[in-house]
Amino acid sequence: MNKTEIIHAVAYADVPDKTTSVEHTVGPELVISHFPSGEDMGGLAIITARMFEDLLKYDTAELDEMADAKLFERLHQTCIEFNEGQIEAFTVPIDILVGQVISSHRKVIGRLQEIAKELGISYTVPEDPLLSV
């Protein structure tokens, strides 16, 4: 796997199987998304994953496309910052929402570590307070 493939796999690690959204391109840079039914709110996970993927690409832009320990360390750190930022954004910490962010973080980091292991890459895991909660 190269950097782009790893980023995509990690960003979408928490999107449930069979989740869909319908998108319409309105202009050269504007895409409107909606969900085929009110029951498929998992489509919100697709939107979040897309934004997360863009952030991971931005944060690793100067790194080579070939996977190495530096890439995994950077991705792990960016995952921590992204999810801590979500928690900090809550005006009032609502336990269920905080729990969802932590659960998502664990899935994403689990996928990141799984990929590293598959590729035979060991990396220095940054201090991750969201894994110890």
Image: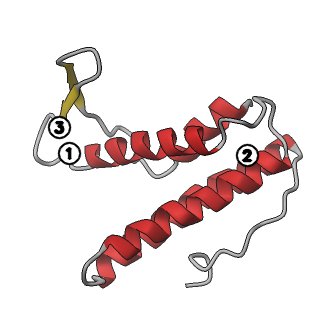
Please report the residue visible at 46 percent of the width from the left and 52 percent of the height from the top: 14
> Which residue was labeled with disc 2?
115
Could you say which is closer to the camera, residue 99 or residue 66? 66
> Which residue was labeled with disc 1?
40
Q: Give the side of residue 93 with respect to residue 11, left or right.
A: left
> Which residue was labeled with disc 3?
35
**From mark 1 to mark 2, how far is it between C-alphas?**
29 Å
Q: Give the side of residue 118 with respect to residue 131, left or right.
A: right
Which quadrant, please, contains the N terminus? top right
- Kindly identify the amino acid type of the residue bearing the numbered disc 1: Asp
Which marked residue is nearer to the observer: mark 1 or mark 3?
3
**Taking the image as drawn, is residue 103 in sight?**
no
Could you say which is closer to the camera, residue 111 or residue 17? 111
**Displayed quadrant of residue 51:** top left
- Kindly identify the amino acid type of the residue bearing the numbered disc 3: Phe
Please report the residue visible at 57 percent of the width from the left and 44 percent of the height from the top: 56
**Displayed quadrant of residue 24:** top left
Q: Residue furthest top?
A: 28
